[in-house]
Structure formats: structure tokens, C-alpha cells
Amino acid sequence: MDIAKQLSHIPLFQGLEPQYLQTLARMAIKKFFKRGETVFAEGDPGTGFHIITTGRVKVYKTSPDGKEQILHIMSQGEPFGEVPVFTGQRFPAYADALTDTSTLFIPRDDFINLIRTEPSVALSMLSVLSQRLKGFTVLIEDLSLREVPARLAAYLLYISERNQGADDINLDISKTQLAGILGTIPETLSRILARMTKEEIIESDDKRHIRICDRTAVEELAAGQRRLA
Amino acid sequence: MDIAKQLSHIPLFQGLEPQYLQTLARMAIKKFFKRGETVFAEGDPGTGFHIITTGRVKVYKTSPDGKEQILHIMSQGEPFGEVPVFTGQRFPAYADALTDTSTLFIPRDDFINLIRTEPSVALSMLSVLSQRLKGFTVLIEDLSLREVPARLAAYLLYISERNQGADDINLDISKTQLAGILGTIPETLSRILARMTKEEIIESDDKRHIRICDRTAVEELAAGQRRLA
DNA sequence: GAGAAACCTTGACGCAGGTCAAAAGAAAGT
DNA sequence: ACTTTCTTTTGACCTGCGTCAAGGTTTCTC
């Protein structure tokens, strides 16, 4: 398939002139990672960044004893691993393929040259990094200032909103991974889901399906105005 | 004082041609904030960003019940509040002046125009935001995966390194603020300092002075290889 | 399709660290 | 200088959530 065509659908390169898409397409290198494979490890030198064409990737940190905190789960069209491109340092986190994943790898030096000639790419990238900073401030707030039930409630509302406010939520990740996103462990998540079910705030019959029964209660939980019994 | 001259000392604008420094100087607006005054609040619209000329500013999040998590403490020469410039959204956090503070305020639209014509500014800003993302990954790791003694030990080593590895550390913030940076509360910080003193890892006679007595122990604490009794 | 591996749930238990209270010392404002 | 406000410390207490263990279920893998 035509790489330039693929690139034209990436939000990061929206509105880029066709000639520059061709330039990008020439510098891009197709890569493939099997489910579970490492894309990069913390401390690796960063010689460029990836854009996902198919599949999903988790970006995460680990503690010495194996607990992990997920920073992002990246899907089709999203770039990741850009930080070392601009700091000139090493990757600050790990990235593993969650499913079989294809990426386009954009080498650092080529990309920086593109930015020098095409400021719209720079502005797009500044927007991407700023969005990500904003996302991190929310995660930091969650970890530092809110309890797990509030984080879970906020996450449910976020997913619901992404689906036009539907009450039925289909997780596209395992509950173990959801625990990793929320900064907790599967046991704790399981217990909190059980408590929310008992209080008839949600239903969670199926494996990866959760239904919001009492949206007001979920909103109050997320806002910290309500606590589970 | 000449604004262009001030700007030329800011890392963000290193290497910028004098003509563009003049352009920046013309767009910059001098602002002043008294100690304790709010620079911006979470949710305010972001029409530009600040660069500190004198003083110090804390950027932080709060919980409904008043606990706060400090994201950054910014000093002379550092820019802050850039995120809404590139996302077009609102400020994701609060910023208060810790001391009487002067800033140069750079309006959003002017700055974006500058970036369009001067890619080196874009690259500098990308570098700043990437550094900040990296800093946030460390904070997230700390909050999620490490305990307070480890975070404190890492902070002490960080300050020591910034002072050419000196064992004597002079905090330029209060211990209450240090607790806010570490994601804990003053009582907990006080107790941990007392335990570290009892184990002769540090001395903390004076108010804002801490001396590292056993650097190896501090390093092991920071690495999670050692625990306080 | 059988065995292995990963996922999910529930129970008992422990502890890091937060809450509340109180008191002494330092700093800021008038 | 005097008052008010903020900072720091210490003690008693409590709780959210992580650890360990163990069982059942689903999902890969060959």
C-alpha cells in the first residue's frame, strides 16, 4: 500500500502539502512487531519515532519488583516515542506491542529537517506533545489526589463519552491492563467493580462489557462527591 | 531594562537571530505578580504563556478537599503555561507566585506566527515540552511505583547533583512545599526525615538545610534497594 | 483439542501513609 | 514590637489498598 496515502490520514500530518507527504513517505521505514514484542525499552537511544498503522502498543513504566504503570495505550494513526527525538536523550519508558502491530518508523534527523522547512508539521507536533502533557497532568492528579473508585468512574465516563455517551461500555483492553492504567492492581480493580455492582451503579455480567446503570452516581464518584459504602 | 537583552538569555531562545529577538521583544508584555497571587487558574482560557524574569512560580493541581500536588516549580528564565497555546484549550493546572515575580507574557497568536517563520524556535519549544514530558514520566513513576522515602532520597540526590555533588543541601522551598512536590503531606515528610536522621543517613539541624551523611544509603533508598527500619 | 498460560475473582492480612489534634518556633504584616 | 499567620514536629488512630494464597475460567499455542 502507498505510504504517502497512509500518512495523509494521520492527524499529525493533516493539511501537509503532497510534496512533503512524499518526502515523509521516502524517509519512513515499515516495521512489524509481534504481540508481546518490545518496541523499545527505557534507556534505549532514540533514533526516531513510530506511527502505528495497525495494532496497539502500550507505553509504560515498571518498578524493580515488577509492578507496572501504563502511560498510554496507542492505536492506529497515533505517533509514539517522540520524546527522545527532541530531547536528544534516551527513551524514558518502555513500549510493548499489545497485538501484532505495524508501524512506520520516522528517523530523527530526517524528521527534524522536515520541521525546519515545514512549520505546520512543527505546530502539529507541538499540539500532540501539549495534549500529552495535559493528559499526564490528569494522570498525576489521579494518582496523587484521587482514590481508585474515582479514577475508575472517570475512566468509565471518558470511554462512554468517546462512544457518544452510550451507557454500554466495551473495553478493548483486559481488566489487568485497565488496572495498569488506573495505577492499581487487578485484585483491587476487581473488588471495586464488585462493590459498584452491588450498589447497582454498574452491571458487569460479560467479560469486557460494563453497563452504566446510575450515571449520576458514576459522575459523583468521579467528582469525589460520593464514596462507595 | 532592554527586553530583547533579557530574552537573549533565555534558553528557549538561544541562537535566535537578533531580528527575531526584536520581534519577540515587541510582542512581550511585562507582568508582575505579588507573592501568593494567582497567575492563572485551572480552566482559565490560555491566550499566551509566561517567561519568568525574576521570582518563582509553582504550577500545581488541587483536590476538592484542598490537598495539592506540585507539578513544577519554575524559576528565572523558564517558560510556563505553554500547553494551551498549542492545544487551543484551557489551562490544565493552577499557577501561583511563590515570591514577588515578574514575567514576560507572550501572546499566543504572535508566538505562533513567529514559529511559522522561525523553525529554530519551534525546535526549542519542542525540546522544552519533551523535557517536561520526560519529567512527568518520572513523577508518575514515583507516585505510582515508589514509596515516599525513595522519592525523597531521589530528590536529595537530584538537588545535590545540581550543586556539583555537594553533600550540603540548601532547600530553596519550605518543607511543606517539598511535601507537595513529593506527593505527600508535611507530617509524613517530617516523620521520614526524622527516621533518616535517626539512622544517620542525613543530618537536618537547620531549617532549610540537610546534609547527606551516608550517600550510599541515600542512593540505595532511591533505587528501592534499601528500606528504612 | 489438549495442555499451558494468562486472566479474573474472593478471602485473610498487613502496612504505608493519611487524618486529626496539639503545641512550639518562625515569619510576615501592621 | 506585637499580633497573626504559617511552618514544623510528634502522638494516636484509621483506612485504602497492596500482598499472599487459592480457586475457577478463559485464551493461546502447538
Image: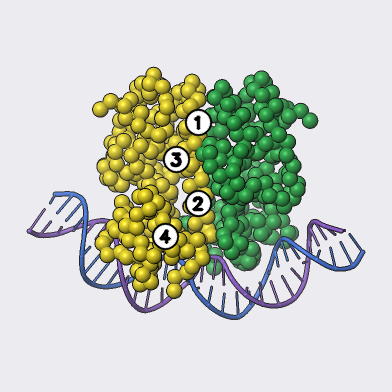
Chain colours: A green, B yellow, C blue, D purple
Task: Categorize mark 4 by other alpha carbons within 10 Å: few (<14), some (14-19), many (20+).
Answer: many
Residue A151: x percent and y percent? 55, 56
Dot in front, 3 or 2: 2
Residue A120 can be seen in this image: no
- In this rendering, do the residues under marks 3 and 4 share a single chain? yes
Q: Distance between the residues labelled 4 and 2?
A: 13 Å
Residue with the mark numbered 1:
B123
Identified by mark 4, the residue type is Leu
Mark 1 element type? helix
Rounded to the nearest whole Å, what is the CA distance between mark 3 and mark 1? 22 Å
Q: 10 Å neighbourhood of mark 3: few (<14), some, or many (≥20)?
A: many
Inspect the image, locate mark 2, and give the three-letter code of the amino acid beneath it. Answer: Val
What residue sits 40% from the left and 34% below the top?
Answer: B11
Label 2 with label 1: CB-CB less than 8 Å: no
The residue where tag 2 is placed is B138
Q: Is residue A102 visible?
A: yes
Crowd around label 2: few <14 · some 14–19 · many ≥20 (10 Å): some
